Image: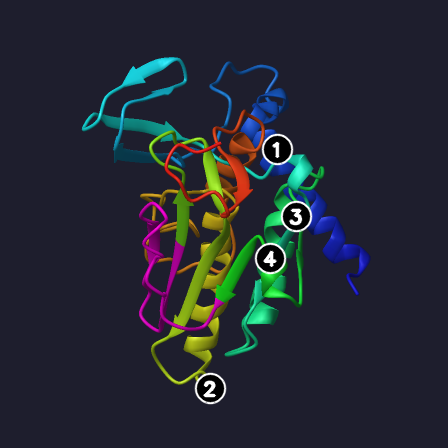
Amino acid sequence: MTDASTQGRRDAGTWRRWAAIFGLAALAACTTIAEPLRPAIYGYSLIVSDTVVGDTTIGGVDYFAGDTVTDTVDFHWPASALPVRIWVQDTVGLPGYAAAAIAEWKHILQYGELDAVLVGDSATADVIVRGSAPAPAPAARPAARRLHAAPAACEGGTDVFISAPDHTKLWLPVRVYVLPKYPVTLPETQACLARVTMHELGHAFGLFRHSPDSLDLMYGFPDVDAPSEADAATILILYHQASDLTPRPATDTLPGGP
């Protein structure tokens, strides 16, 4: 149970984060003209490039066999797809780490922009989290875009499959892998698994790129235990703009299909 003082600190931290993002902190200084305090956001878009197999039309543009289609795409889970259903393999403490990660990201997006729940059936999941090595991508699907994190005591990866060559759909499920490299009884391994699970779910929730700042959770080699103000600012911006991708079950495996 969260006591009043702890909740107060969390609420105050949330206000400060919103204030910093939208420049409200400038209101505190009435006699001094200064730039609004805004945490720097980082890039979250994914650049995807595929070759057209046969003549086709995409978005009103004609492409011919051999042409290359390159797009910069953003993604966040639409309200119609919520809650995001996440199945987690019951190994190395992953269910507990995943539940904590969901709570942390939802606390940032606290106005209902994101909701996610753990489910018991992987066949119904939008996101699958495993504690094993990534499986090879099925040949019928476009190549996965693999997003990877590798701190010292564990490592993780997230595979996102985007329809090709149209780049309009995110095939489900998104696949996440979190692997210990040292014994799971060690405190440093447990801490690593917790932060990398949170990092990888950040990818699954739409932060497709890494931050260049080592103080952010979404850095490629994360060494912090929770999203930073820059992580929070970035995902808030992402969830308040249009998404380029529509989540779809991966039943349509033909490139550019409906």
Q: Amino acid at mark 1?
A: Trp
User: Which one is in front, 81 or 190?
Assistant: 81
Quadrant of res 103:
bottom right
User: Which one is in front, 21 or 108?
Assistant: 108
**N-terminal of the two: label 3 or label 1?**
1
Q: Is residue 258 above or below residue 119?
A: above
Q: Residue at x 63, y 54 (%)?
A: 85
- Magenta part, dominant SS: loop
- State the mark number for residue 107: 3
Mark 4 highlights which residue?
Answer: 125
Q: Position of residue 250 (x, y in %)?
A: 49, 48
Its colouring scheme is rainbow
Mark 1 highlights which residue?
Answer: 18
- State the mark number for residue 185: 2
Q: Position of residue 173 (x, y in %)?
A: 51, 53
Foreground tag (3 vs 4): 4
Foreground tag (4 vs 1): 4
Q: Is residue 230 above or below residue 61?
A: below
Foreground tag (2 vs 1): 2
| Residue 141 lies in the magenta-colored region | yes
Alpha carbons under labels 3 and 2: distance apart: 29 Å
Foreground tag (4 vs 2): 4
Does residue 91 appear left or right of residue 27 in this picture?
Answer: left
Does residue 218 appear left or right of residue 201 in this picture?
Answer: left
**N-terminal of the two: label 3 or label 4?**
3
Task: Classify mark 2: helix, strand or loop.
Answer: loop
Q: Is the residue under label 2 in contact with that under label 4 (CB below 8 Å)?
A: no
Q: Amino acid at mark 4?
A: Ala
**N-terminal of the two: label 3 or label 2?**
3
**N-terminal of the two: label 2 or label 1?**
1
Label 3 environment density (alpha carbons within 10 Å; few <14, some 14–19, many ≥20): some
